[in-house]
Every structure is written in structure tokens, then in C-alpha cells.
Amino acid sequence: MRVLQVHKDFEPSRGGGGTARHIHGLAVVLTQLGHEVRIASPIVEPISEPYKTVHATALDLRRHIGWADVVHVHGARSGYAFKGAMIAKAAGKPFFYTPHAFYADKSVGNGVAKFVWDNSAERFLLTFAQRTILLTQYWREWLKKRGLPRNRTEIIPNCVLGSDFIAPASGQPKLGGSPAIITVGRLDPVKRVADVIEALADPLLANAHFHVVGKGEERARLEQLARDRGVADRVTFYGFVDDEGVARMMGGSDCFVLASEMEGLPTVLLESLMSRVPVVCTQLPGNLAITEVAGVQSTYPVGDIRALAKLLAASVNDSVSAETAQKLREEFTWEYRAKELAALYTASIRDALPA
């Protein structure tokens, strides 16, 4: 089976985010199952093994879709995904759709634009996809509340490549601070990294150090906030760090923090727990879908700085067992879950054949 994955930004080892890592892990395991996989994107990391990436603008997608037996487009409210889906539909190729997450309105105008999109392009995707793959039950209810189609949805959680995430080797250099707190991800307002900087001013965290890995538009504002709060000497910004470097830093930290106000089902949270690093995170449906499996209690309401400070201070006494890490691998890694999606792909190809 020839499978084409389509996403507007695919750089899984260059800090490209959780969606790129989700697609990467799926592609690796699909090739291990004997399928041929290409990933098309206008912003793409060159990869030739075990799957192939291709640089493709929206105008280039037609020939790559012509190669495929099945097409899988990724990203909610994405013009690139929508174009891929339209071409697949016109070519008679079955397509799948994974929105990952629908972000909240940023303004009245933004909300109007999203309403128009949801009731045109997004409705097309949800109506004509062979299956829309949702990450949690929450998103099915989200669609229901907005009157969008949900009858062709399947729930398969966000997954990672489990072979990449094992407990860090003992003896990793300890990061500074007690606790040593780390976050990894793009520096974007929705991630609320500022909340963690605010929490550092709490006396409970007088000896803590916050290690911030990632790049993005918020960095300058966050650096200024740290200076304003008098904690700049206890916040270190690293920019982009490769996977090997992140693994070492995780192994030297006391906890990972995810303060976001919106997530689909965050890959980075899975990676932390599978690496047996304790986590502190917000009480979002996507986060809770992971923490409930892991038995993690260190969650707090979005924006509650005092609750965040208390949980971070207590994290020095937390741990993640090998049994918990294994439970998460069985639920959230492609090694265990890719066969479900491959079976849906195969069925869609069979259904598309002439009677």
C-alpha cells in the first residue's frame, strides 16, 4: 500500500512540533509493516529512509496524490490540508483527516473567520474523509456542540515512536535548580510559558531553575518578563535543541512542565512520562487523557499560578515507575497502535474499488 501523508510543516528533528513527530512515528512503523510512505510538505526536512519526504507546494500535490493509494491530511483549519483533500477527492483517492486540535478564537474577527472556515472547508473535510481521526473523545463532543459532522470519526490517540523514548541512562548531568524544571516546545502565547516564570517568584520556588527549550515569537517577551519579576538568573533559554540533547536534559531534570491553555493530545507530555520524568500540567482534556492513564495527580487549572508553584515545588519527590511508562507505551505508541490505522487505510482502498 502506498500512503501519502500531507502536512503544512514537517521537520520532526528540527523542532517542528508534536504533529510532525506524530506523523514521523506513524510513517516509520507503517514502513515496518511493509507499506511505502511519502510525506509531502512545503516546509520539509529531507528524509529518504525508511520513508521519503517530498517538498511540495499546494500546486505540486496533484502528482504525489496520483502516486498514492490512500492520502492522510493533517491539521485543522489548514489550507494546505484542505487542498490535498480536494485533490484526493477529485482523483477518486480515499483520504483520511486528522485535525489534531482546534484552537480557540484570538479575537472577534478571528472567531468570525474560523466560523466561516468551519462551515465550509472544515465541513468538507469532515463530510468526505473516509475517516476523521480524533485524538480523544473530547473532540467528538466539540464537533457536536458546533453542529459539525462527527459520524465518520474514529478515536486513535496521538502517538509517538516508542523506541525513541526509554528511561535516560543513569548519571546524566543534573540541571541547575531545586527543582530543575524543564519545558520543551514552541514559544507561543498558547503555551503560557509566562505562567511558569510568574510561579518562580513564589517563595516555594526560591531555589528552582526553569530551563526553556524551544524557539518562537514569545522569547523576547518572556526574557523581559523574567527580568521584570527578578528571576532572570533562574531562567535559561536554550533555543532549539536536538533530540539527543533534549533526552540528556530530561534525564537531568526534576520535572517537565506544560502550562498550555490548549492542546490536542501533547506528544511532549508522552515523551516525558515514557522517559520516566515527572510532569506538571494543566487540566486540559488532551493532557488528562494521558495523566489519567499514567495515574498522575499533578495537574492544575489553566492560569492558577499559586497551584502551579505548589506542584512544581513538590515535584522533587515525584517519580514515574517502569510499569507506568510501559502502560503508556501500550496506549500511545505507534508500535502498538499503527495496525489500527493501517487496517482502516486498507479497508478504504477496498471500498473504493469498482464493484
Image (spheres, rainbow, N blue to C red):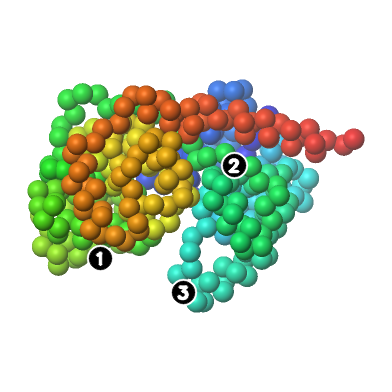
At x 66%, y 62%, the residue is 147
Disc on the earlier residue, 2 or 3: 3
User: On the image, numbered disc 1 is attached to which residue?
Assistant: 221
Q: As shown in the figure, which amino acid type bears the numbered disc 1?
A: Arg
Residues tagged 2 and 3 counted as in contact (Cβ below 8 A): no
- Write the residue at 57% across / 57% down: 142
Answer above or below: position of 63 versus 167.
Answer: below
Q: Residue at x 24, y 48 (%)?
A: 311
Q: Which residue is tagged 3?
A: 107
User: Please, what secondary structure does the residue beneath circle 2 have?
Assistant: strand
Looking at the image, can residue 74 be seen? no
Labels 2 and 1: the sequence-earlier one: 2
Q: Are marks 1 and 3 in contact (CB under 8 Å)?
A: no
Secondary structure type for disc 1: helix
**In the rendered view, would you say 34 is above or below 238?**
above
Any part of residue 142 in sight: yes
Instruction: Locate residue 172 relative to residue 323 in the image: left or right.
Output: left
Coordinates of residue 218 in the picture (x, y in percent): 30, 62
Instruction: Give the vertical position of 139 relative to 217 (above or below).
Output: above
**Residue sitting at x 59%, y 54%:** 141
Mark 2 or 3: the one toward you: 2
- Tell me the amino acid under the disc marked 2: Ile
Query: Tag 3, which secondary structure?
Result: loop
Residue under label 2, please give it: 155
Say which of marks 2 and 1 sits in front.
Answer: 2
Q: Quadrant of residue 169?
A: top left
For the residue pair 116 and 142, the one nearer the viewer reads as 142
